[in-house]
Image (tube, helix red, strand yellow):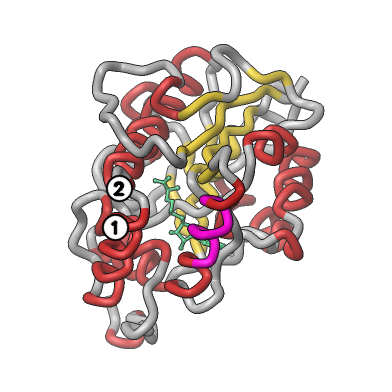
């Protein structure tokens, strides 16, 4: 790693990737991130457990796609900092040689991913630093072209991600652009911060916008999240709280007031 491979990092504003890392027990974060976590946990007790439950859902759904659906290639949008059981590790354990393209906009994710070699770039895995909304750039990127065969099904993952995207950036359109490009038999997987209480949606959205310097979207309703799956065949158990999606006994009690909501669907 060269010195100039290290990016400019804003340590005065919390970042979604670093906050999420801290909530999972990681160390790739700064004081400002840890303070944001405290404020969030004060406002919404159970948020650490909610984050851990989300990460376990990611593991389960990748395992499911690899073992039950025969998916051998993944695009992980908003991948986050490397932690345990990253997508390529889960997928390759189930099916050696599975291909994974990670995409994230946060320079710390790229730097730490490469330094730790956890999201190792090898013949099966690549990391692209890009805005997920720039679908054209991701699809035409040389690493995507090298790893993903668009004639074969792909797993498109947006796990704990679309709430980072405001409505004026058209998160539904972003998802549709990718899905339109994928072969029949491809899968979409989503989890999304959701609340049934409009006041909670408003309060947490305001907190996120403030903590992340405006780089955030919003907490949405279940109906809005369901809209991202339009035209696709949702697989059992449907769209649910993520800890109820094929639970494996590691689920923790989390917040009663908000949830990571989502599921998995097949492109017919
Ligand atoms: N998908 C991982 C998981 O569920 O364990 C990590 C989710 S983390 C909450 C959301 C990630 O999305 C962060 O790493 C953040 O940097 C990234 N992100 C936010 N906006 C983005 C954008 N416009 N383009 C690419 N990545 C983005």
State the residue position of label 2. Answer: 45
Residue 62 is left or right of residue 156, and the answer is left
- Label 1 – label 2 distance at C-alpha: 6 Å
Q: In the image, what residue occupies the spot 36% across and 18% down?
A: 247
Image x and y of residue 156, in percent: 60, 38
Is 71 placed above or below 176 here?
above
Which secondary structure, mark 2?
loop
Q: In the image, what residue occupies the spot 59% across and 18% down?
A: 238
- Nearer to the camera, 31 or 135: 31
Q: Is residue 154 located in the magenta-colored stretch of the structure?
A: no
Disc 2 residue lies near ligand 1 with CB under 8 A? no
Q: In the image, what residue occupies the spot 46% across and 38% down?
A: 259
- Nearer to the camera, 74 or 187: 187
Is 177 placed above or below 138 here?
above
Mark on residue 42? 1
Q: Give the main secondary structure, helix, strand or loop, of the magenta stretch.
A: helix
Q: In the image, what residue occupies the spot 76% across and 65% down?
A: 168
Question: Which of the 4 quarters of the picture holds residue 148?
Answer: top right
Mark on residue 233? none
Would you say residue 142 is visible in this rendering?
A: no
Report if the CB atoms under discs 1 and 2 are less than 8 Å apart: yes
Question: Which of the 4 quarters of the picture holds residue 170?
Answer: bottom right
What's the magenta region? 200-206
Residue 131 is left or right of residue 241, and the answer is right
């Amino acid at each position: 790693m060269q010195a100039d491979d290290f990016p400019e990092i804003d340590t005065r504003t919390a970042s979604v990737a670093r906050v999420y890392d801290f909530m999972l027990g990681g160390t790739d974060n700064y004081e400002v991130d840890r303070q944001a976590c405290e404020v969030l946990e004060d406002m919404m007790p159970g948020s650490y457990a909610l984050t851990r439950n989300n990460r376990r859902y990611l593991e389960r759904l990748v395992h499911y796609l690899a073992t039950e659906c025969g998916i051998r290639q993944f695009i992980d949008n908003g991948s986050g900092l490397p932690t345990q059981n990253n997508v390529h590790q889960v997928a390759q354990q189930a099916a050696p040689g599975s291909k994974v393209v990670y995409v994230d906009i946060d320079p710390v994710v790229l730097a730490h991913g490469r330094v730790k070699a956890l999201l190792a770039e090898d013949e099966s895995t690549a990391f692209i630093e890009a805005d997920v909304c720039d679908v054209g750039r991701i699809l035409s990127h040389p690493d995507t072209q090298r790893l993903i065969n668009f004639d074969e099904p792909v797993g498109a993952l947006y796990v704990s991600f679309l709430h980072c995207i405001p409505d004026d950036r058209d998160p539904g359109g972003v998802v549709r652009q990718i899905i339109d490009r994928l072969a029949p038999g491809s899968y979409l997987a989503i989890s999304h911060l959701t609340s049934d209480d409009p006041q909670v949606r408003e309060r947490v959205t305001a907190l996120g916008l403030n903590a992340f310097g405006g780089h955030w979207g919003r907490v949405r309703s279940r109906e809005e999240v369901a809209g991202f799956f339009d035209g696709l065949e949702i697989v059992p158990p449907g769209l649910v709280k993520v800890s109820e999606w094929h639970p494996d006994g590691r689920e923790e009690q989390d917040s009663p007031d908000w949830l990571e909501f989502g599921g998995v669907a097949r492109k017919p």
